[in-house]
Image (tube, rainbow, N blue to C red):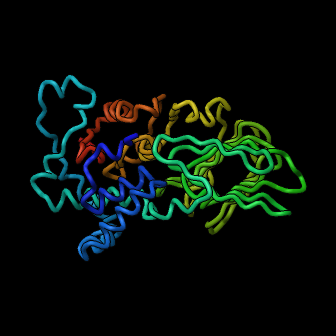
Amino acid sequence: MQNDLDKRPEPTTASEWRIALKENPSDARLQRRFEQWRAADVENRQAWEEVGHLTQLMKRLEPEFEPARQTPRQKRSAIGVLKTAEVARRRPFLGSAIAACLAFMVGVSLLGGTWADYETGTKELQVVTLADGSEVTLAPNSAINVTYEKEQRLVELVKGKALFDVTANKQRPFIVQAKQMDVTVLGTSFEVKNAHGSGPASVAVRHGKVRVAQKQSAHPETHILGAGEWTAFAENSDAVSGIRNVSRIGSWQNNLLLAQGNALEEVVADLDDYFTGVILVAGEQLGRQPVTGVYQLDDPEAALLAISVSHGAKIYRLSPWILIVSKG
């Protein structure tokens, strides 16, 4: 059966290859084609390496985005409201640089992601039953490594977020490691979200209790959380905690995004896990704007449109795989 990738043109640039590999992290055939592309020309190898040097480009480009002309049919269509960036056509180098920058910001380690014990792609949910009967539900674009030892059960959340239903064993603690914290439990259900970019890592408890120990901080904190409680750690910042209705925790299992004052860049990062390509917010001030509402994760473009309208922002489409949210 032909997959979605087979219906698209063969990637020809470093940025397109990064997007294609993100969407199909376990496709061995795609990996071989990429290796052939990279080995075919020294310029291809250089382009692949130079993607990593473009992460600061977007900060200087916000004034460059201009709305495109639209046909009446486009104006009647929700998808048509996603503007095409004329600037990308008028300035070919700028357009390709933006594309490369966007692709890189999805993650430098796209190729290495397939080394995780368990990994999901875009729009994919996976329930993993561990050796002790504990279950881990992986959100899209998430990955874990599992190490079970005599004294402890260790799960590393490599990227993304996951919901854990843990089998109790007081003699063998269950520990989840994320970039900014370690979460230790004896028997409970909880969600762990790894940091995305400059955003915080967080833990929210459905039932039971967990101990959360902050890492990578000048003054690390430890918190004991019960049902409905959550805490979030940003890098080198104090913890932020609160109370949440337990029905809201892990709502992504039902394709729902429940935002309550979340930063726009954080909400966009969640939608990006369900979009075939990459979405980026242009401008730190816009990215910090709070978002509140209920959105369907399985229709990320409609959700993005609703959010942009409420914030006076516009959406520009640079290609079928690249969207930019920009103010005005």
Q: Can residue 286 be seen?
A: no
Q: Nearer the viewer, residue 319 or 195?
A: 319
Q: How many marks?
A: 0
State which quadrant residue 205 falls in.
Answer: top right
Q: Nearer the viewer, residue 302 or 25?
A: 25
State which quadrant residue 276 falls in.
Answer: top left
Horizontal relation, residue 109 to residue 57: left or right: right
Look at the image and tell me in which quarter the N terminus lies: top left
The residue at 16%/52% (across/down) is 88
Q: Residue 92's x, y, as percent?
A: 13, 58
Q: Can residue 37 be seen?
A: yes
Q: Residue 105's x, y, as percent?
A: 38, 58
The residue at 23%/25% (across/down) is 77
Q: Is residue 129 above or below residue 42?
A: above
Q: Is residue 307 above or below residue 289?
A: above
Q: Is residue 300 above or below residue 185?
A: above
Q: Residue 263's x, y, as percent?
A: 46, 44
The residue at 72%/61% (across/down) is 147
Which residue is most to the right? 171
Horizontal relation, residue 33 to residue 64: left or right: right
Horizontal relation, residue 179 to residue 228: left or right: left
Which residue is most to the top? 76
Q: Nearer the viewer, residue 46 or 86?
A: 46
Which residue is most to the bottom? 42
Look at the image and tell me in which quarter the C terminus lies: top left
Q: Residue 71's x, y, as percent?
A: 11, 29
Horizontal relation, residue 170 to residue 14: left or right: right
